[in-house]
Image (tube, rainbow, N blue to C red):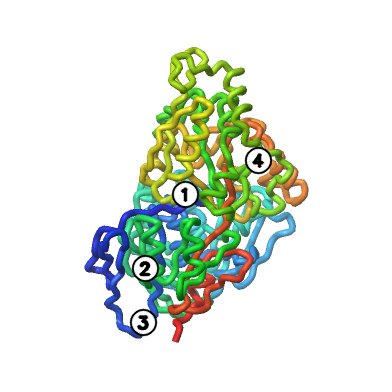
Amino acid sequence: MSRWKRFYLVVACCVLLTACIQDAGQVGVLVQTKPASAAVVRIGRMGSPDSLNPGVAQLYTAYTIFDLVYDAMFNLELDGAYSLVLAESYTVADDGKQWTFKLRPTFKFHDGQPLTAEDVAFSYNFYKTNVDFPLLNAYTKFFDTIEAPDPHTVVIKLTQAIPNLESQLINLYILPAHIWSAHTTGKEPVEFQNSTLIGSGPFKLVAYQQNEFVHLAANKEHPLTPPTVDEVIFQTFGHEDALVQALQTGQVDMITELPHPTVPTLRNAPNVKLVTGAPFFPEVADIVINQIKAQDCPQAAGGQCTGHLALLDRNVRLALAHATDKQQLIDVLLLGLGKPGLTLIPAGLGAWYNNTLQDYQFDLVLANQLLDDAGYQDRDGDGVREMPDGARPLIFRLQWPTDVITAPRMAELLSQNWRQIGVKVEPQAVDPDALIALCCPGFDFDIILWGWFADPDPNFLLNIMSSAAIAMASNESGYANPRYDDLYAQQGVELDPEKRKVLVWQMQEIVHHDVVYIIPYYPQKAQAYRTDRFSGWLDDQPRLALEDLSSLVRITPVQ
């Protein structure tokens, strides 16, 4: 449900932190000043949280930290099952509209205050009330009331019975009401920095420098999953080669991602184990096409809506799709570790994925013919087509966030193929925060290369293409289709899995036909860790996520 991770160059040194990050050419060096007996896990990654405020954070790098610092009602396990965390039991009314949770009495926040039903009710109401939250507010759509009749009981009443409440609660982190209640009015909910990041989870914040590191200490008093290690430090790297080198030289113990071309090298590296597998949250690489219409531009929310008018034409989008060689992208960028994509709903979501759709085959001749027939001609002979009225050439801004390591090469390959159909692009890497502003709700772009991590339930990714999500800053393409909106509303309350599947498949047919996105691939996950530092990494599960709580509370130092 979150955007792909991002990265920044490690350039500063923080004297307040017990570990200092120093610049050493391209490699960030983490120097430990902790006692030798402390078990400190260093994790290298190419991203940094965009915010420590769960209400406004959108990037996966933030959610990996939230999952460690906060608790939620349910946890998603590596086998796809849901497990209770904060509650010891729950009951559901016969009509499915009331859920009653009995909380465990032993949870405490990191500042020592007890976690009670009041905190749970406060948190859910907080997410529900703040419609400006771009992601988490959507999970509360069917929440009517949330009450705490006593310190250990939470009652959620829904406006309608829904088929997926468990999946809606895994990312609704429980906030300490005694801290957040002072930040509920005006712009406070979105402007509160939450710099102390007080939660109740297995890890607690020690220090944080955006774009550099996140330093966590173990919460040894956690009632369910107290970590064995003492600390975890996520270190941000500015280049994928530096990230891989840091693992090989022992500066970090694990890396959360790696450029696929380095896979052969790491397979043979001493004291390093490379693992590949299905992502914990299925990943979707997407080519986002700005299709916002003038009447839908969310100007009140800051919409600029400067997209190239040619992209409103399905013929142009379809031509771009036929001029995208997905297998080439998979072979070059992923070394074959991926599958061609179809829609935002990835194959990793199993039955929700419409596998009957026929992809648009790579065919430059057909792509050129589509543009010819639609009146896009190269009138001045410079190799670039113009609009049918001749007013504007087909030159599109092609942008991507600086933390997507495959994007620069993808942009190069797309540019080469699209140029063969008379389309020129202006490539540009953009800071992820800035790109979010350009994208959503700015619509100040033409085409963006990015991606999503999917929820276990399809509802969130389906919502991204609904017209109501345009003003909410989660619809990134500006696509609006009343028939799609109607089906989205129906699937959200359909309790019969087979009937809901039919609706979800119909929605995918609509957006695939309309070429709302070009989905180059669904990538496999590739991670690596040092075998001489810590043991117990869960690398043999149905899904791979070594940065997940499941591994970080289990690993132990190698003796």
How many discs appear? 4
**Could you tell me if the residues under marks 1 and 4 are in contact, i.e. CB atoms within 8 Å?**
no
**Could you tell me if the residues under marks 1 and 3 are in contact, i.e. CB atoms within 8 Å?**
no
In screen coordinates, is 283 left or right of 506?
left
Q: Can residue 152 be seen in this view?
A: yes
Q: Check the image and report above or below for 21 versus 496.
A: below
- Where does label 3 land, which residue? 38
In screen coordinates, is 270 left or right of 205?
right
Q: Check the image and report above or below for 424 versus 74.
A: above
Q: What element carries label 2?
A: strand
Q: Is mark 4 on a helix, strand or loop?
A: helix
The mark that comes first in sequence, 2 or 4, is 2
**Tag 3: Cα neighbours inside 10 Å, few (<14), some, or many (≥20)?**
few
| Amino acid marked by disc 1 | Thr
Residue 218: image quadrant is: bottom left
User: Mark 1 or mark 3: which is in front?
Assistant: 1
Which numbered disc covers residue 205? 2
In screen coordinates, is 398 left or right of 10?
right
Which residue is at 36% across, 59% downward? 237
Which numbered disc covers residue 489? 4
Return the x and y of residue 156 as percentages of the image width and height.
Answer: 60, 57
- Where does label 1 land, which residue? 406
**Tag 2: Cα neighbours inside 10 Å, few (<14), some, or many (≥20)?**
many
* Nearer to the camera, 288 or 174: 288
| Amino acid marked by disc 3 | Ala
